[in-house]
Image (cartoon, rainbow, N blue to C red):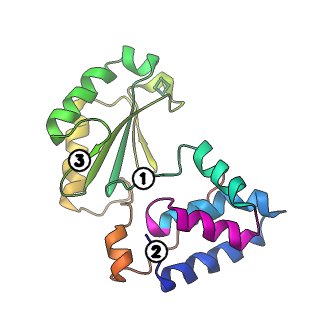
C-alpha cells in the first residue's frame, strides 16, 4: 500500500521528534516503526523504506528489526487483533478449548480475519504472563485469566463500538488511510521495546 502524502508527513514529523529523544538512528528504529505501523496499520515494504530512508539506516537493518519482533504486524489484520497464547502454561489453563470456542464464535480459524474486517484471530507463543493464563492480547491490551464467556462479552463490547478506556484502541483501517478518509489518526505515544 502506497502511503498517502498526508499520512507520510505525519509519520515523518513524529520520527523527527523521536530522533531528538534517542542517541542514534538504530535506537530510534524501534519507536519509528511503531509510529509508522500505528498510522498505516501494518508494516509494509513502503513503511520499511520510509523508516530506512528517514533514519538513513540500511534497509536490511530495518527489515531485520521488523521481522524479529512479533509486535510489528507484517500482514493486514482486523480492527482488533486477537492473539491467544497457546503455550504450555496457558494450554494447561484451557487455552486450546478457548481457541476452539473463539473460532466457533467468530466463524473463522486461527490465522484468519472475519469478513467484516473486525477481528483477526491468531494463536501465538508465550506472552510472558504465564501465571495468569490463558492470556488473550487484543491490540495493545492483555486480558488475563480469560474464559470464553469473558472473551465473548469483550468482543461484543468492541463490536458495539463502545468507547471506553477499559477497551483496546482499534487499529486504523488501511482502506480509509488509502482513501484519505482518515488521514490523521490520533498520534500514538512513543513506544519503547
Ligand atoms: S504460556 Fe501463555 S503467557 Fe506464557
In the displayed structure, 47 sits above or below 148; it is below
The picture places residue 41, in percent across and down from the top left corner, at 43, 63
Q: How many C-alpha atoms fall within 10 Å of the one at disc 2: few (<14), some, or many (≥20)?
A: few
Q: Secondary structure at mark 3?
A: helix
Q: Is residue 140 left or right of residue 10?
A: left
The residue singled out by tag 1 in the image is 75
Query: Can the viewer see residue 32?
Result: yes
Q: Earlier in the sequence, mark 1 or mark 2?
A: 2
Query: Which residues lie in the magenta part?
Result: 39-57
Q: How many C-alpha atoms fall within 10 Å of the one at disc 3: few (<14), some, or many (≥20)?
A: some
Q: Nearer the viewer, residue 44 or 149?
A: 44
Say whether mark 2 is within 8 Å of ligand 1. Answer: no
* Residue 45 colored in magenta in the image: yes
Q: Earlier in the sequence, mark 3 or mark 1?
A: 1
| Quarter holding residue 62 | bottom right
In the displayed structure, 37 sits above or below 83; it is below
Disc 3 and disc 1: Cα gap in Å? 22 Å
Q: Is residue 25 left or right of residue 84?
A: right
The residue singled out by tag 2 in the image is 2
Amino acid at each position: 500500500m502506497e502511503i498517502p502524502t498526508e499520512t507520510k508527513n505525519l509519520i515523518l514529523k513524529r520520527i523527527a521528534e523521536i530522533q531528538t529523544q534517542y542517541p542514534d538512528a538504530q535506537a530510534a528504529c524501534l519507536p519509528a516503526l511503531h509510529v509508522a505501523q500505528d498510522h498505516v496499520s501494518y508494516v509494509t515494504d513502503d513503511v520499511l523504506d520510509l523508516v530506512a530512508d528517514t533514519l538513513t539506516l540500511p534497509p536490511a537493518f530495518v527489515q531485520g528489526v521488523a521481522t524479529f519482533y512479533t509486535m510489528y504486524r507484517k500482514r493486514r489484520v482486523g480492527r482488533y487483533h486477537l492473539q491467544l497464547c497457546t503455550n504450555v502454561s496457558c494450554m494447561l489453563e484451557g487455552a486450546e478449548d478457548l481457541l476452539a470456542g473463539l473460532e466457533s464464535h467468530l466463524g473463522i480459524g486461527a490465522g484468519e480475519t472475519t469478513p467484516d474486517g473486525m477481528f483477526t484471530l491468531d494463536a501465538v507463543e508465550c506472552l510472558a504472563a504465564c501465571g495468569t493464563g490463558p492470556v488473550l492480547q487484543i491490540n495493545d491490551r492483555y486480558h488475563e485469566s480469560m474464559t470464553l464467556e469473558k472473551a465473548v462479552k469483550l468482543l461484543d463490547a468492541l463490536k458495539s463500538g463502545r468507547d471506553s478506556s477499559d477497551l483496546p484502541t482499534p487499529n486504523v483501517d488501511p482502506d480509509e488511510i488509502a482513501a484519505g478518509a482518515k488521514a490523521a489518526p490520533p498520534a500514538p505515544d512513543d513506544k519503547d521495546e
